Image (cartoon, helix red, strand yellow):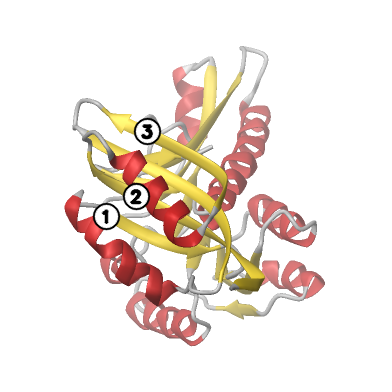
Amino acid sequence: MPNPNPKTAILLIDCPDRKGIVAAIVNFLVERYDINILNADQHQDVELGLFFMRVEFVTEAASFTEAAFRAAFAPIAHDFQMNWRIEFAEAQQNVALFVSQYHHCLVDLLHRHKAGEFRCNLALIVSNHESARTLADFHGVPFHFMPIARDNKQQVEAAQLALLAKHKIDLVVLARYMQILSPRFVDAYPLRIINVHHSFLPAFTGAKPYHAAFARGVKLIGATSHYVTAELDEGPIIEQDVARISQNDQLPSLIQKGRDLERMVLSRAVQWHLDHRILSYANKTVIFA
């Protein structure tokens, strides 16, 4: 009997590469749930012998529930040694934005959310500077001022983690939050903290990459969005972009062009994460179209 409320789901898979994976997945979905595939994409890492796939589909089958799907799909997953997960399009993720004194990325994210580009719940904004409160109030997002210093870092992070747990946060976005997160914080949200670094990593890491790039006389500058790991600026890269500069670009111009790049690479990373388009492995990412 068809379900009067069709469900749209996303199946994400990675496993050792071998013949028959795609056929097994598609046949299972069609035969059991009579699905309509909205989007399907796959990738093979030939060097490591790995297979990756994302299938977005819709079904009217009344028997399609998360629990039932997990039980039915388990034998196939076991046979192909799959790491996998099923996500539902209608489920909105709770997102927290962290920011310090530079607000360009925050402004961009808030605007995109208001314009309907991000399908999520912006649950809160956390900052170690009061200056972001006006923006939060304008957009109706709860603001939490949490000043942090060397002697209170552990206590503040504990309060931040408690706040995130209270609001059931799914994703933390560091929109130019100029604090290094502790391993304890990072471990609480594995592959669920996205940062933007104002450099084309791995070049020019650290606090002042634009100054270092300017001093080096580079012809291209860039920005990088990545998942946060315990190793500073070493997490899996999600998106990067570059802009050409010349000898006519002084440091202020270089910084301005860099900030434009930061906005773009961070917004793309957030969008792809919310759309379940990212799989991470070997400190790298696969981004599905």
Task: Give the spatial CA distance, label 1 vs label 2.
Answer: 6 Å
Q: Is residue 126 above or below residue 75?
A: below
Residue 79: image location, x then y, percent: 18, 52
The residue that mark 1 highlights is 83
SS of the residue under disc 3: strand
> In front here: 81 or 102?
81
First-in-chain label (2 vs 3)? 2
Mark 1 in CB contact with mark 2 (< 8 angstroms): yes
Question: SS class of the residue under badge 1?
Answer: strand
Q: Does label 3 or label 1 sit earlier along the sequence?
A: 3
Q: Is residue 257 visible?
A: yes
Of label 1 and label 2, which has the lower sequence position? 2
Residue type of the residue flagged with mark 2: Ile
Residue located beneath label 3 in the image? 43
| Residue annotated with mark 2 | 13
C-alpha distance separating marks 3 and 1? 15 Å
Q: Tell me what residue is drawn at x 24 percent, y 42 percent.
A: 282
